[in-house]
């Protein structure tokens, strides 16, 4: 058999735009962490939004299964992109990105703005956003793998995933 070439393409303007739109358009995502003290992976569905700079953000209860892993600060993985109503779900665009979690303290200067932005996108969170066990966590992208559809795989870095300035 002849050697096969790498099907993963370098990022280009179209793949960057698609990846950023998947992040900015997502209202929820799958979050993968490694449970502290184990080598066991754990995946959970989370609510997702972005801060004013386009950095992914989630609101997490300290009582959740994944909270300890986020607090530990190790890298996490996030999957965004949902299948459309028709066709093979595996042909619809999706992005998996690795990120570093960064907790936002309740007394941080930007907390009020994050809260207001979050509630615009997630109005039902008004019921619990101010509970003492809930806090915002930024998910700062490090790298990503974009599947833009059949035969459209791209490797992205942190700059590719950052919202344009």
Image (cartoon, grey):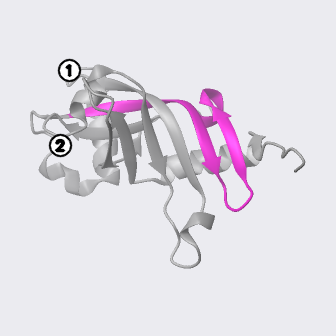
Front-most of residues 112 and 49: 49
Does the magenta-highlighted stretch encompass residue 67? no
Q: Nearer the viewer, residue 109 or 28?
A: 28
Residue density around tag 1, few if under 14, some if 14–19, many if 20 or more, within 10 Å: few
State the residue at coordinates (60%, 28%). 158
Is residue 114 left or right of 141 when viewed as pictured?
left
Which residue is drawn at the image coordinates 18% and 50% (left, top)? Answer: 126
Distance Cα–Cα, label 1 vs label 2 = 14 Å
Report if residue 163 is visible in the image.
no
- Residue 146 is left or right of residue 83, and the answer is right
Which stretch appears magenta?
A: 135-161
Which residue does the image show at 40% across and 50% down from the upper left? 29
* Residue most extreme to the bottom: 86
Is residue 58 shown to the viewer in this render? yes
Residue that carries the numbered disc 2 in the rendered image: 129
Residue 128's spot in the image, x, y percent? 13, 47
- Read off the residue under disc 1: 107
**Residue 140, how many percent across, how many down?**
46, 28
> Disc 2 on helix, strand or loop?
loop
Query: Sequence-wise, which precedes: disc 1 or disc 2?
Result: 1
Residue 116, image quadrant: top left
User: Is 27 on the left or on the right of 152, as rendered?
Assistant: left
* Quarter of the rendering occupied by the C terminus: top right
Q: Which mark is residue 138?
A: none
């Amino acid at each position: 058999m002849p050697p096969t070439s790498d099907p993963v393409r370098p990022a280009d303007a179209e793949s960057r735009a698609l990846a950023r739109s998947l992040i900015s358009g997502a209202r929820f995502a799958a979050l993968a962490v490694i449970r502290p003290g184990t080598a066991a992976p754990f995946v959970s569905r989370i609510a997702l939004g972005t801060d004013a700079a386009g950095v992914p953000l989630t609101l997490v209860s300290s009582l959740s299964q994944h909270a300890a892993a986020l607090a530990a600060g190790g890298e996490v993985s996030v999957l965004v992109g949902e299948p459309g109503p028709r066709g093979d779900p595996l042909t619809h665009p999706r992005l998996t990105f690795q990120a570093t979690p960064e907790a936002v303290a309740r007394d941080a200067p930007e907390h009020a703005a994050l809260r207001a932005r979050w509630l615009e996108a997630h109005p039902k969170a008004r019921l619990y956003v101010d509970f003492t066990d809930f806090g915002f966590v930024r998910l700062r992208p490090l790298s990503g793998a974009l599947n833009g559809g059949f035969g459209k795989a791209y490797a992205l870095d942190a700059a590719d995933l950052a919202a344009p300035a």
